[in-house]
Image (spheres, rainbow, N blue to C red):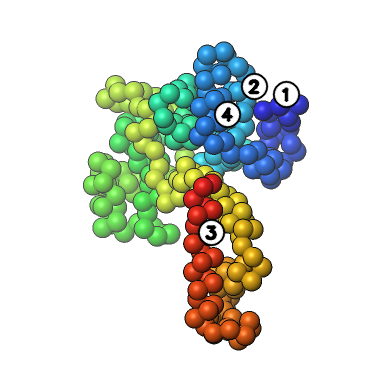
Amino acid sequence: MPSNTLAFPTPASLGSLDHYIQAVNRFPLLTAEQEVEFGRKLQRENDLDAARSLVLSHLRLVVAVSRNYLGYGLPQADLIQEGNIGLMKAVRRFDPERGVRLVSFALHWIRAEMHEHILRNWRLVKIATTKAQRKLFFNLRSMKPKLGALTRSEADGIAKALGVKPEEVFEMETRLSGQDVALDPPAGDDGETMTPSAYLTDSDAEPVQILERAETAHNRSVGLKSALSRLDSRSRNIIEARWLREEDPATLQDLADQYGVSAERIRQIESKALKTMRGEMGTL
């Protein structure tokens, strides 16, 4: 990353959270090869520019993770700041020789810092004092089958899944919905030290999946444009009309009438064009 890049962005430095999110989304994603290159430079030479590149390219991941914790009443900007600390810890510990993408490795560290921030700032009484209660604290919202109060059978199911009593589920639901509840989470009653990875929230859209889908979509878009450029104008128009039109894609007969040939001839042109495009995209 060039040294004249924008100073490390924070919501405060950019004026608002929206401006910050727009800024971090402009930092390009790194390829696996680039991650390995920068990781080696950091590991072997303590290259801070390499570390900076790894951090900046994953700031959008922190934003995505922070959205999973908005229900705890804490400012998203604060969650992002804490998550960025976790990201920097992950970058410092990243081993490029293990063949694991940084996005997967960093998730634990980002979530860990956010979890600790939430527990430090929630003023709860007798909540999250045991391993099971902490797990209940971080998972109850996502496990509730619907909005509104839990039924007895729903509470029983959650209690069984998390290893707590149904009464604890109802108590936690009351405290979380009341917002003016309490806590200083000391060490667990059983003396165990709780690590955040044991009570991570579940999500249908994990940030790692979001980033992978974004990177895949970008690569496909670039590959599609390159493949289309290899076609002659008629073949390109046929492919676009048949496959890329969002509404009312053209039929073979529609295009046959347009070009004054048979539907079979259009099918042959389409088949040859698709073969050419598959070959081109396979080389990217």
Disc 4 packing (10 Å; few <14; some 14–19; many ≥20): many
Residue in the image at 68% along x and 36% along y: 11
Residue in the image at 71% along x and 43% along y: 19
Q: Would residue 221 be seen by someone viewing this image from the given angle?
A: no
Residue corresponding to mark 3: 277
Residue 82 sits in quarter:
top right
Distance CA(mark 1)–CA(mark 3): 39 Å
Q: Amino acid at mark 1?
A: Ser
Q: Nearer the viewer, residue 157 or 205?
A: 205
Disc 3 packing (10 Å; few <14; some 14–19; many ≥20): many
Q: Would residue 265 be seen by someone viewing this image from the given angle?
A: yes
Residue 7 sits in quarter:
top right
In the picture, the quarter occupied by the N terminus is: top right
> Which label sits on residue 3?
1
Distance CA(mark 4)–CA(mark 2): 9 Å
Earlier along the polypeptide chain: callout 4 or callout 3? 4
Residue corresponding to mark 2: 49
Q: Amino acid at mark 2?
A: Asp
Residue corresponding to mark 4: 54
> In the image, residue 248 lies at what x, y percent?
57, 79
Distance CA(mark 2)–CA(mark 3): 39 Å
> Looking at the image, is 177 positioned above or below residue 91?
below
Distance CA(mark 1)–CA(mark 2): 7 Å
